[in-house]
Amino acid sequence: MNVRDQILAASDIESQALYMAEWGVTVVVRSMTGLERERFERDYEAAKEAGQVRALMAALCCYDQDGNKLFTLDDVPALATKSTAALGRIFDEAIKLSAISKDDVEALEGN
């Protein structure tokens, strides 16, 4: 197998199961793909203005135990009304798994 095929075949998405006591369910938080990271960066400013950054991250990174995406971007406003503690844990885990640094966040905020 050549290098290109090795890269494309690599299983490089990390995940972590989190029990969400507030909701009584376990969600699987995955690292973002390149496409999801681009969507996050594209939609960050609008989400920030609407107070929905953590909800946006949850929509991009939450899956069920079978690997099915739990939410769509249309769910972001409804997710934003959920527990800040729960959304914060998802956000923190997604940031860690996706290797988003403090510098990355500051760059998004224009600092």
Image: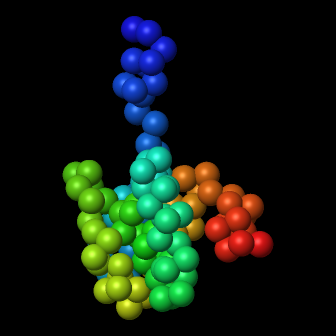
Q: Residue furthest right?
A: 111
Q: Which of the 4 image quarters holds residue 29?
A: bottom left
* Residue located at (74% from left, 61% from top): 103
Residue at image position (47%, 52%) is 31
Image position, residue 49 (x, y; %): 53, 87
Give the residue drawn at x 62%, y 57%. Answer: 100
Residue 34 spot, x, y in % from top left: 47, 47
Image quadrant for the N terminus? Answer: top left
Q: Nearer the viewer, residue 5 or 110?
A: 110
| Residue 24 lies in quadrant | bottom left
Picture residue at 49% right of the left edge, 56% below the top: 37
**In the rendered image of this protein, does residue 18 appear above or below residue 88?**
above
Percent from the top left, x then y, of residue 33? 44, 48
Q: Position of residue 44 (x, y in %)?
A: 53, 72
Observer-nearest of 38 and 57: 38
How many numbered discs, if any? 0
Q: Give the quarter of the figure containing the C terminus.
A: bottom right
> Can the viewer see residue 82 in this picture?
no
